[in-house]
Image (cartoon, rainbow, N blue to C red):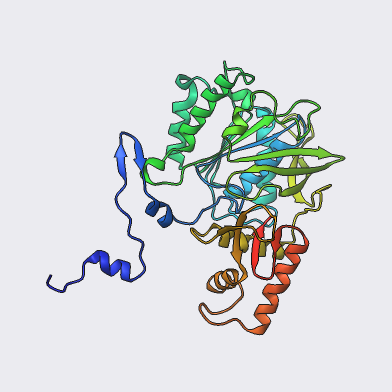
């Protein structure tokens, strides 16, 4: 030994995580625990709800407003705007496949343009698309996703995209899912985050959340996020019934606002609607949080998303084990992120501690977090 220090040792001494090279077997990338520990924190298109490289299903009975809702959400993300107090990480490049209601799509987009402003990142296709037959439109769509740099693609609706397949047959839906996965995974082989694929799907005419979407359950089984959209007496709501890597049970409200458009070429009046966020009706104890309080909840969710941060415990005797953080961890996380307007790594003032305590208590009272004197968990 000549007493010199290797580059790896210098990096490790500085706190860097050293991982061994991934091993490739054909297209399969085999990783180790060290790769999981060194993985970056979970990122989002819409914080706490929609992430890159995932599949979401937004379903509800006909005329419930799901198209207006998801279109408004997608157009807003193209502008870098979130909804329900949840922030967009950046301006998202969107491709909306409007195979259902294609005739009115231009008017809906015009209304969003006039209300929210121009969105150069928003693209749409207003014609039928076959995503069942891999020799039909799949390769053309993949080429569009690649050239436009699409990060979010909306499939509206499954019934209009399954072509010659049968949505009641699990085998046919499985073929559609495999083709959607080919889009969702684009760029992942080069270390990219992938494309979020949001599928709109119908429920039965009289069905509610307990019945699930119509047809085979294979689509819901494959989804990372499932949202049930419903409306009653003009008030819409979106219930997060299943989320693989984020809290389930959140309820978001919306309403459809009429918008008048300029007359058509023959002088006939034109009108459409825009979905606007609102308080959720009948949310069973949950509601859309005020913007400031929602920001505090998002900060908690950020802390929970840090790799290796949580510990699975039973916070109170007899409770099912759940991922938890200590209140000290939250104080440290928010201090470093300057959430408390504190300088990183300096002790909090009494006023800052009071602010943290008050916000934790308020979120606990709204049943969005659970808390003891030492632990915090998401509900």
Return the x and y of residue 351 as percentages of the image width and height. 68, 82
Residue 116 vertical placement versus 179 (above, below): below
What residue is drawn where x is 59% and y is 47%? Answer: 50
Return the residue nearer the eye: 287 or 350. Answer: 350
> Which quadrant would residue 147 be assigned to in this image?
top left
Residue 17 vertical placement versus 249 (above, below): below
Kindly give the residue lying farthest to the right in the view shown.
Answer: 233
Examine the rendering and report whether any part of residue 195 can be seen.
Answer: yes
Residue 342 vertical placement versus 94 (above, below): below
Return the x and y of residue 40 as percentages of the image width and height. 45, 56
Return the x and y of residue 19 as percentages of the image width and height. 33, 55
| 157 left or right, relative to 176 | right
Kindly give the residue lying farthest to the left in the view shown.
Answer: 2
Residue 55 vertical placement versus 253 (above, below): above
Examine the rendering and report whether any part of residue 257 can be seen.
Answer: no
| 253 left or right, relative to 328 | right
- Give the quarter of the figure containing the C terminus: bottom right
What residue is drawn where x is 78% and y is 25%? Answer: 205
Return the residue nearer the eye: 326 or 88. Answer: 326
Return the residue nearer the eye: 128 or 206. Answer: 206
| 231 left or right, relative to 91 | right
Return the x and y of residue 3 as percentages of the image width and height. 15, 74
- Give the quarter of the figure containing the N terminus: bottom left
What residue is drawn where x is 74% and y is 58%? Answer: 289
């Amino acid at each position: 030994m000549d007493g010199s220090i290797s580059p790896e040792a210098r990096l490790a001494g500085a706190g860097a995580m050293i991982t061994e090279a991934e091993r490739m077997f054909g297209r399969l990338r085999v990783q180790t625990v060290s790769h999981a520990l060194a993985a970056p924190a979970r990122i989002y298109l819409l914080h706490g709800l929609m992430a890159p490289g995932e599949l979401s299903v937004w379903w509800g009975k006909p005329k419930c407003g799901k198209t207006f809702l998801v279109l408004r959400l997608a157009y807003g993300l193209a502008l870098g705007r979130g909804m329900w107090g949840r922030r967009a990480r950046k301006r998202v490049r969107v491709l909306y496949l409007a195979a259902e209601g294609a005739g009115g799509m231009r008017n809906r987009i015009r209304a969003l343009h006039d209300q929210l402003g121009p969105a150069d990142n928003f693209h749409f296709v207003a014609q039928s698309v076959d995503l069942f037959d891999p020799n039909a439109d799949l390769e053309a769509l993949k080429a569009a996703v690649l050239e436009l740099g699409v990060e979010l693609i909306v499939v509206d609706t499954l019934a209009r995209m399954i072509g010659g397949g049968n949505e009641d047959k699990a085998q046919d839906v499985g073929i559609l899912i495999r083709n959607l996965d080919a889009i969702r995974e684009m760029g992942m082989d080069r270390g990219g985050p992938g494309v979020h694929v949001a599928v709109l799907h119908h429920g039965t005419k009289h069905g509610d959340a307990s019945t699930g979407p119509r047809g085979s359950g294979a689509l819901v089984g494959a989804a990372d996020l499932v949202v049930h959209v419903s409306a009653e007496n003009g008030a819409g709501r979106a219930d997060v019934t299943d989320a693989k890597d984020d809290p389930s049970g959140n309820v978001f409200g919306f309403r459809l606002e009429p918008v008048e458009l300029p007359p058509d070429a023959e002088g006939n009046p034109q009108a459409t609607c825009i979905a606007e966020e609102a308080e959720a009706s009948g949310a069973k104890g949950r509601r859309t949080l005020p913007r400031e309080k929602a920001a505090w909840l998002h900060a908690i969710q950020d802390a929970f998303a840090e790799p290796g941060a949580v510990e699975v415990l039973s916070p109170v005797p007899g409770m099912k084990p759940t991922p938890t953080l200590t209140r000290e961890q939250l104080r440290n996380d928010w201090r470093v992120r300057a959430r408390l307007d504190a300088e990183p790594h300096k002790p909090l003032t009494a006023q800052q501690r009071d602010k943290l305590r008050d916000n934790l208590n308020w979120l606990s009272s709204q049943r969005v977090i659970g808390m003891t004197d030492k632990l915090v968990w998401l509900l």
